[in-house]
Amino acid sequence: MNLALGTIHTMRIGEKVNNGYSLTKGTFQITLPIEHSDEKLVEGENVDVFLFKDRQEKVVASTLIPKIVIGIYDWAKVVDVIPGLGVFVDIGTTVEVLVPKDDLPTFQKAWPLPGDKLYVTLALDKQERLLCRVAKEALFTDMIRFATDIDLNDQVGGQIIRVDKEGAVLFTEENHRGFIHYTEREREPRLGEFVSGRVIEVKEDGTINVSLLPLKHERMDDDAEKIYAYIQEAGGVIPFSDKSEPEHIQHTFQMSKSAFKRALGRLMKHGKIEQRDGKTYIKK
């Protein structure tokens, strides 16, 4: 008799052995190592345990019951990143489980980092070792709430559940689906990252569009501070002015020429800078 791994079983506690307790269910027998137990066990009683293969490929039991098992999805925190392999997540038991790279974005810069959260379930590989599989966006469909209680510019936050070249999908704390177009962010968010943004559209299908950029007047302040800091680091002068080529501005400051000109105008209005001979100087 073999018991399914990656699931929970009720087993009878047998005698204490050198490194733990003997457990049985029918003809199946296994050892529960002391390091995989968080409770006092009594011979002859039953105990619920989680079965899995450890790193030595040995089947072991744990009384630390995970919130995620085969067929059950939940959020798991990323604890480690292994380039070229995947990320390990904490599912709430004594082992951390691999999310393979095939379940992650193609580009590693969009992979989750420690502290990010992924919505996953357990699976077994061909050797019956534990893996975590990331939920596809379609799995969230039944959990999504229609956005009838949201207004424009409301702040929302949540986990990124999909990233691609067009943008990212956000599952908010209120269970709304939010889309972040690539033009509405300063950088690509990571899968599993928690982000906060503002609502820029409530769509007829009950979903929302979200921007991670500040409001225009706030953005102008941020742009001005960014440019002023750049001039300071450059020794008080930069070879840029409001006549500079747009592509040069975009490459250096990651902003459009119109945004650059607005920020320069704001700095000049406050007496921070001046322009001469195609260059911009800190005003003394």
Image (tube, rainbow, N blue to C red):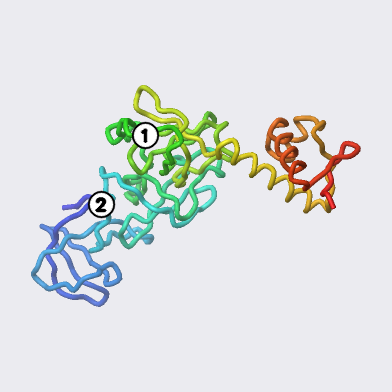
Q: Looking at the image, is mark 2 or mark 1 earlier in the sequence?
A: 2
Q: Nearer the viewer, residue 174 or 169?
A: 174
Tag 1 residue:
150
- Element under disc 1: loop
Quarter of the image where one finds residue 107: top right
Residue at the spot 47% in from the left edge and 34% down from the top edge: 210
Tell me if mark 2 has few (under 14), some (14-19) or many (20+) residues whose alpha carbon lies within 10 angstroms of its own: many
**Front-most of residues 91 and 140:** 140
Residue drawn at x 17%, y 65% is 23
Residue nearest the observer in this picture, 179 or 270: 270
The residue positioned farthest toward the top in the image shown: 204
Measured as percent of width and height from the top left, residue 154 is found at: 42, 38
Circle on res. 242: none
What's the amino acid at mark 2? Leu
From the viewer's perspective, is 215 left or right of 45? right
Question: Dot 1 surroundings within 10 Å: few (below 14), some, or many (20 or more)?
Answer: some
Closest to the camera, between mark 2 and mark 1, is: 1
- The residue at the point 33 percent across, 39 percent down is 175
Q: Which amino acid does label 1 sit on?
A: Ile
Identified at 48% across, 36% down, the residue is 163
